[in-house]
Amino acid sequence: MQDFGSIPYEVVLEKQDYFPAGRTTGVSIAAIKCLLVFGLYNDFRTKEVSLSLSQIEDVTGCSKPMVIEGIKQLCSCGIVTKVDQGKTNVKGKYIINFPSKRFTQIPYHFLSYQLRNFPNKGITALVALKAYLILLKFRNNHTSQTEVSYIGFAKYGINLKHLSKALAILISLDYISIFKQYNWDEKGYNKSCNNYKILQFPKTFTMYNKIDAIDFDSVLEDGAT
């Protein structure tokens, strides 16, 4: 049973914004959603994925034209390569380009059924998806917790003006929660503004996660033992 998908570790970089706002806000939202779908369904060894546009529409909740534009954006950025199969194939074939052996885990079952319900319009929705990619990238070893400061979000291209509302979307849709720590002096729980819990990760595979990403070979070797 598949518990997680994978996307390139290098999708989130300090000086490179693959998903800009402005006139391309809607396309960038579609591109991130398409990336997550490819991450869910790609072959673990070959990084290949075969899906029809209607299948991608169904999982992303985006319209067919937006799916097409989102895929074009991923291809233009070099994140995904579309394999030319002629015009007779119902399913398109794509390869996710992993620049290194490191990758970031994404929760399989939750995104497979709930990604379609994520908003497709607006700067706040885009910032929420970009923040989600950042939180996934820096999920802590063996846990579902991740720590990113507001300054940290800004380093990776997040517009802080929209961040609070963006995080509220992720929280309301059960993508993340604010991590709470017990305060012995006040005898109660305090919320930390920099610590988050990424929800929907099965506990069965957190043992594989590294603080920044995972090595493909090590996971395959562990799985074969």
Image (spheres, grey):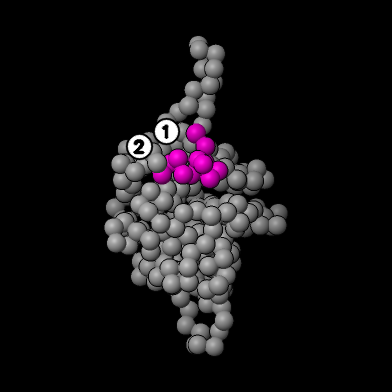
Q: In the image, residue 109 lies at what x, y percent?
A: 63, 54
Q: Residue furthest top?
A: 185
Q: In the image, residue 77 lies at what x, y percent?
A: 36, 66
- 224, above or below 178, in the image: below
As shown in the figure, which amino acid type bears the numbered disc 1? Asn
Mark 2 lies on residue: 150
Element marked by disc 2: helix
Q: Quadrant of residue 216?
A: bottom right
Q: Residue at x 50, y 12 (%)?
A: 186
Q: Is residue 113 magenta?
A: no
- 144, above or below 83, in the image: above
Q: Residue at x 50, y 11 (%)?
A: 185
**Residue sitting nearer the eye, 110 or 22:** 22
Q: Which residues are magenta?
A: 166-178
Q: Residue at x 54, y 68 (%)?
A: 56
Q: In the image, residue 129 lies at what x, y percent?
A: 43, 51
- Tell me which label, 1 or 2, sits earlier in the chain: 2
Q: Residue at x 50, y 59 (%)?
A: 36
**Residue sitting nearer the eye, 50 or 21:** 21
Question: How many angstroms separate mark 1 from mark 2 (CA)?
Answer: 7 Å
Q: Quadrant of the N terminus?
A: bottom right
Q: Quadrant of the C terminus?
A: bottom right
As shown in the figure, which amino acid type bears the numbered disc 2? Tyr
The label on residue 194 is: 1
